[in-house]
Amino acid sequence: MNLYCTESEQVETLVREEIERNDLLRDIHRLGIAVSGGADSLALLLLLHPICVERQIAPVVLMVDHGREGEADACAFVASVAERLGVPFFTRKGDVNAQLHPGESIELAARNLRMVFLQELVEENRLDAVATGHHADDVAETVFLRLCRGSGVSGLAGLRARSQNGYVTVVRPLLRISHAALCEWLRKRRERWIEDPDNQDESSRRVLLRRRIFPFLTESFDDSLLQHLCRTAEFLREEDEWMVREARRQLARFAPPSSLVTPASSLSVPHQSLVPRHSSLLISIPLCALRDMALPLRRRLLREWLFDCQLGDCTGWEMIDRILEQCETEDKNWVISLTQNARILCRDGSLRLELEGKGRNEAPSVVELPQEGDLVWGAWTLTVRSLFAQEARREADQIQRNGGFAAAIAQCACNGEPLRVRSRRPGDRIELTGLDGSRKVQDVMTDAKIPRELRDQLPLVVCGETVVWFPGSRISRSFALTDEVQPAWLLQAVGCSLPRRTLPPAG
């Protein structure tokens, strides 16, 4: 496989091959294309545009103006290209110098600003993913730079063709193509681009590597250096993916049974969500089980666990080794602080994570439920299916008998208003089926013996301000099914393990 293409004639073919090989456009209907005006991102736009047309994907051009000199002109240039192609263009302007923290490089500050703005643009335009112009030279540079700072396999595996950055799905179709090949491809099309002045600034390690170190190493040792680095990244990426799968398989052993996420269908996941494999905050890992694993698997299991709990900043090797060293002691009760709001505890020989303070434990905001498909809300995954009442009631009852959480909701009761998910609020009440009047949601949770620490994390399904249902509760009688053939929504919630209790039929 050609992992470092230098021939412009191969560019279009390789992009299509990369898209097919990694299924990059899977479940994508609206695609943001990040363009800066430089050669790489401009080539990305021109290469993806016809593919999007063929696949009936709606492309949207996104640009971030960091507030630096010359970027206003670049923004106008990108807007003109988007207009020529008939593609919507959206931009955000910030001031990267104002965002610069002490000791932080301008390159990192610009990247952070870019990701914040891209996430905003993704949410506002309901995009399924963002495509970026990272190419084969970026892969080689990333491997070299991470090797210099002592990265593990995950870091050395470099850039992925498809990955998740926060809540943004990122696709990179150009990872097998060199910068030189992209530039030559543009020249043959008589396309112009705008050179980024930062690419001349050798105070940046990446620019220094590109302009001085790689040319020296290539001339002095091996003119195939970049190809070799890309090949190494590919090997490590395959090994890393295997290790992640194995770590997650082991991690799932320690999840509460009802917290395992089982996709109900092949329906696509909303763009703003990540799908957790389980409710990771509820996992408890016995030390004896951890010690039985090989050391590399122990390290990877802890890293995946912390990532799932949005503690990626705590997954450096020093912290992981500190935790593992403590696990080897005879002490069965200890605590290690991870951040100001998070800590890992060992209690009676088992590990668990605990989040404290405002911010980390805050429930997600109010989110509209899809009429079909999955929605991830905090530690919960909610799946909605549109069925007739009889089938919806039967399936909901079966899920409840198996210890899960489900409700069959009459569509007509919503009067065209969407169902939403939020956390509980003071004064919330629900009119439970089988009972007169209404009850405080707080009292229903107390009667259901839902642990106090989980109550603010529980998804309440509401229509307007009316509470329709939540896991562990009966459905509101106003939304219960009244006949066998009326349209209904089957709603299943998978997440936390709550106390078992007998509920009436779901409909």
Image: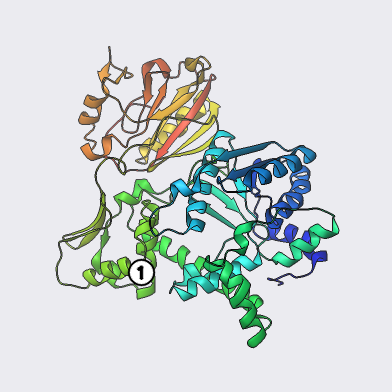
Residue 445, image quadrant: top left
Where residue 127 appears, as percent x and y from the top left, is 60, 39
Where residue 148 appears, as percent x and y from the top left, is 47, 75
Left or right of 81? Residue 444 is: left
For the N terminus, the image quarter is: bottom right
Where residue 333 appears, as percent x and y from the top left, is 15, 61
Residue 485, image quadrant: top right
Residue 10, image quadrant: bottom right
The residue depicted at 34 percent of the width and 31 percent of the height is 423
Q: 460 and 2: which one is in front?
A: 2
Left or right of 104? Residue 82 is: right
Residue found at the very far bottom of the displayed protein: 221
Q: 415 and 150: which one is in front?
A: 150
The residue depicted at 64 percent of the width and 68 percent of the height is 137
Residue highlighted by disc 1: 317
Q: Amino acid at mark 1?
A: Trp
- Element at badge 1? helix
* Count of numbered circles in the view: 1
The residue depicted at 31 percent of the width and 28 percent of the height is 424
Residue found at the very far front of the displayed protein: 69
Left or right of 84? Residue 302 is: left
Q: 288 and 118: which one is in front?
A: 118
The residue depicted at 15 percent of the width and 65 percent of the height is 332
* Picture layout, residue 306 above or below residue 322: above
* Picture layout, residue 173 above or below residue 407: below
Where residue 219 appears, as percent x and y from the top left, is 67, 84
For the C terminus, the image quarter is: top left
State whether residue 31 appears in this view.
no
